[in-house]
Each structure stands twice: as C-alpha cells, then as structure tokens.
Image: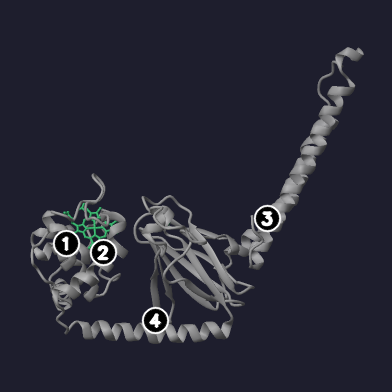
C-alpha cells in the first residue's frame, strides 16, 4: 500500500496502518493469554479443569471491549469515507468514460477531450522485443491534471463495467454504463502516476492502463490552452480532408495504421479474428460485400455486441482509410476506394432518415 500524493490517500494509508496495529495488538494479547494458559495449566503439572458456567462480569467485558474498539476504528474510517465522497467546490471537472479497451477524458467546459490508449508495442507483448520499464502501464495521451486544485471526476462507461484506479490518489471507482459515479482528487506533488482498469472487462482488460501527468497550475493552464489550439487545428484539418481525394496507396497506409491501433485488438493484425468471438475481416461477407453495410458497421457499430460505434472515435478520413484497407488487405481485393467525403455523406444521410432506434420508438408509441 502506498501513502500516495493526496491528503485522502495519506488518510487511507494511516487508517490502514492504525487498524493493522490494532489487529496486531489484539492478536498479541489474545494469543499471549492463550499460550500462557495452555503452558502454565498443562495436565502434566496436575492442573484440574474448573467447572463453572456463566460469568456475567466476563461476558459484559468481552462485549463492551470489542464494541469500544470497533467504535474507535469506525470514527476515523467514516471521516475519511465522507471526505472521499465530498465532490463539492471543485475547480475542474473531468468526465472519464471507459470502453473496451481504452479511456476517454473530457474536460468540462473546456472543449478538450481525447482518448487514451495503451502505447506498449505489440512486439513487447509478444516477447519479440525487450519489455520497457513501464510495460503495459504507458499510454499515447495521458490525462493531464493540475496540482493543488480540486478535480472532480464523473465516471461512466460505453459498454461493460470498468473501474478507474490510480493507487497514488486512492481513487478507485467503477464506471458503469448508463450511470455516473463521482470521485475527486487534489494532488500535492507533480509527477507521473500510473494505474489500471480494476474491473475484469473482457479480453484486453489488462491492456487499458491509466497514466496521469500532474503538473504545476500555470504549466497546466498553458497545456490546456495548447491542447485546445491543437484540437481546433485537428478539427480544421478534418474539415479540409473532406474535400481531399486520396490515392489508394495513401488510404491503405493510413488505414493499416488505424487498423493496427484500433481494430487489431479484436480482429487481429492478420485480419483473421478470433473464432467464435471476433469475426475475421479477411473474406468477411461485410468487408467484401455491400459498402453501405460496411460503413454502417464501423460508423454505428453493431448494437449489443463488442463492435462499438466509431463515429465519434475516428475522423471521417480515418474511417475511410480503415474501410479501404479492410476491403483490399489480406486478399480481400475488392478494389473499392472510400474517401472521407463518402463517410460524411453516409453520416448526413443517416441524420435525415430516421434511425432504426427512432423507428422502433415510433412503433412502440
Ligand atoms: C472490442 C472489439 C472490437 C473492436 C476494437 C473492433 N471490432 Fe469490429 N467487430 C467486433 C465484433 C464482436 C463484431 C461482430 C458483430 C456482430 O455480431 O455482428 C465485429 C464486426 C465487424 C465487422 C463485420 C465483420 C463481419 O463479417 O461480420 C467489420 C467490418 C468490423 N467489425 C470492422 C471493424 C473496424 C474497422 C474496427 C476498428 C476501427 C473494428 N471493427 C474494431 C468487435 C470489435
Ligand atoms: Cu476495463
């Protein structure tokens, strides 16, 4: 157990040690008396057992003493628990969304949001390269937080239950689909803190770590402004990409990158999926068949399955590239080329005609 870098984590640590020492004390007294009695009054010394029943004095004592000990432990424990739940008067709110298998961070009212994905290379995982110091505990984009400010977390999930756990903050909270949990932290020391998903959430549960960069307040403000500018630029580039027509080679290169980063965890790098769990893309009827169904599968996902909607996770350009890649890699060879504008058009058409969900709602009404 770590003392951590927040007031709450220090309290939790102290509480743990206090109760641990109380347990040790009780054990020493109880076992001490027991072993002493066994030794001192042993049969070989001619000890004769006393025959008596009911001693009100002793019974009252062995009820009252533990009750006092329990109350003495409950008071500090309750204080710490109440402090952990008190998310009021926060300076910054970050929404954390878990999904298979990555974290999404969104800074409230700041127009800054991004995904945070495992950055350990597949070669390290496959034992083909030496493992780095932060093996499976490193991400492409860490959560950045200021020190000395109260940060409130709102936690939810897109699919199954995950749990956001950073031991140094003593924050460990389940993220539950359709439900928002709250937690908070106020970090004392700048640094890099690592954690993991702590709820068994499927095949790549061990591959969705958490990394938090805690920095000085001014440094954080600068970072936030830079990030805003960076994201605005990316959005502008995405807008510009809608008008671009890329060659099949460019689409295949970009598509392969997107596929490896975002799809291979389920459908596998060789496109062959995992039998019975994740369908193969090689020779897939979807990847070789109707284009609209293929686009829809990625944009809208397949509801009720692990195939999530990538509409808000990838840009139109990235979706176009990965679809082109899937339709032409591994001998799929359809020769189809999909451009960002096609994806944009598909999304636009979807907005005009009522979706399947709306239709079913109407049917119910
Ligand atoms: C978390 C696991 C997961 C990830 C990540 C994932 N998929 Fe899927 N995908 C699935 C599952 C499960 C299905 C089967 C859905 C069903 O039952 O129809 C599927 C189905 C598909 C299909 C239809 C295949 C067929 O023959 O039925 C395509 C195409 C596809 N995914 C493309 C993608 C692309 C592109 C990406 C990355 C941008 C991706 N998937 C990422 C789990 C995943
Ligand atoms: Cu998880």
Identify the image quadrant of the N terminus: bottom right
How many angstroms separate mark 4 from mark 3 (CA)? 38 Å
Which of the two marks, 4 or 3, is nearer to us in this view? 4
Q: Quadrant of the C terminus?
A: bottom left
Dot 2 falls on a residue whose secondary structure is: helix
Residue 27 placement (x, y as % from top left):
77, 38
Asked if residue 34 is positioned above or below residue 102 in the image, the reply reads above
Q: Is mark 4 within 8 Å of ligand 1?
A: no
Q: Which mark is residue 259?
A: 2
Residue that badge 1 annotates: 329
Mark 2 or mark 3: name the one nearer the start of the chain: 3
In this rendered view, identify the residue nearer to me: 59 or 237.
Answer: 237
From the image, tell me which residue sits under label 4.
Answer: 111
On whether ligand 1 comes within 8 Å of the CB at mark 1, the answer is: no
**Marks 2 and 1 close (CB-CB < 8 Å):** yes
Q: Quadrant of residue 8?
A: bottom right
Going 16% across and 68% down the picture, which residue do you hit?
324
**Which residue is disc 3 drawn over?**
77
Crowd rating for badge 1 (residues with CA inside 10 Å; few <14, some 14–19, many 20+): many
């Amino acid at each position: 157990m770590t003392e951590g870098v927040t007031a709450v984590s220090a309290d939790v640590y102290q509480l743990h040690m206090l109760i641990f020492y109380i347990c040790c004390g009780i054990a020493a007294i109880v076992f001490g008396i027991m072993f002493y009695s066994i030794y001192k009054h042993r049969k070989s010394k001619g000890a004769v057992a006393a025959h008596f029943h009911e001693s009100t004095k002793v019974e009252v004592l062995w009820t009252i003493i533990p009750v006092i000990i329990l109350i003495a432990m409950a008071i500090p424990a309750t204080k710490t628990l109440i402090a952990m739940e008190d998310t009021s008067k926060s300076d910054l709110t970050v929404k954390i969304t878990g999904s298979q298998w990555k974290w999404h961070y969104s800074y409230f009212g700041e127009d800054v949001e991004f995904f945070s994905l495992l950055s350990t290379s597949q070669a390290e995982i496959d034992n083909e390269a030496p493992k780095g110091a932060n093996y499976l505990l490193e991400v492409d984009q860490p959560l950045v937080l200021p020190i000395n400010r109260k940060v409130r977390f709102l936690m939810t999930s897109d699919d199954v239950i995950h749990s956001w756990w950073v031991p140094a903050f003593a924050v460990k909270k389940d993220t539950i689909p359709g439900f928002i949990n709250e937690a908070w932290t106020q970090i004392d020391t700048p640094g890099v803190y690592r954690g993991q998903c702590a709820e068994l959430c499927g095949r790549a549960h061990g591959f969705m770590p958490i990394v938090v960069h805690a920095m000085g307040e001014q440094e954080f403000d600068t970072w936030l402004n830079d990030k805003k500018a960076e994201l605005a630029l990316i959005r502008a580039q995405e807008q510009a990409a809608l008008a671009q027509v890329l060659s099949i080679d460019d689409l295949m290169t970009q598509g392969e990158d997107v596929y490896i980063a975002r799809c291979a965890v389920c459908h596998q790098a060789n496109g062959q999926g995992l039998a019975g769990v994740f369908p193969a893309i090689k020779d897939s009827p979807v990847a070789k068949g109707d284009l609209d169904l293929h686009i829809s599968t990625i944009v809208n996902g397949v509801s009720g399955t692990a195939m999530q909607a990538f509409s808000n996770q990838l840009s139109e350009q990235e979706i176009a590239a990965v679809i082109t890649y899937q339709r032409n890699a591994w001998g799929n060879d359809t020769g189809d080329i999909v451009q960002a504008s096609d994806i944009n058009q598909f999304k636009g058409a979807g907005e005009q005609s009522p979706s399947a969900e709306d239709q079913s709602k109407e049917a119910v009404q």
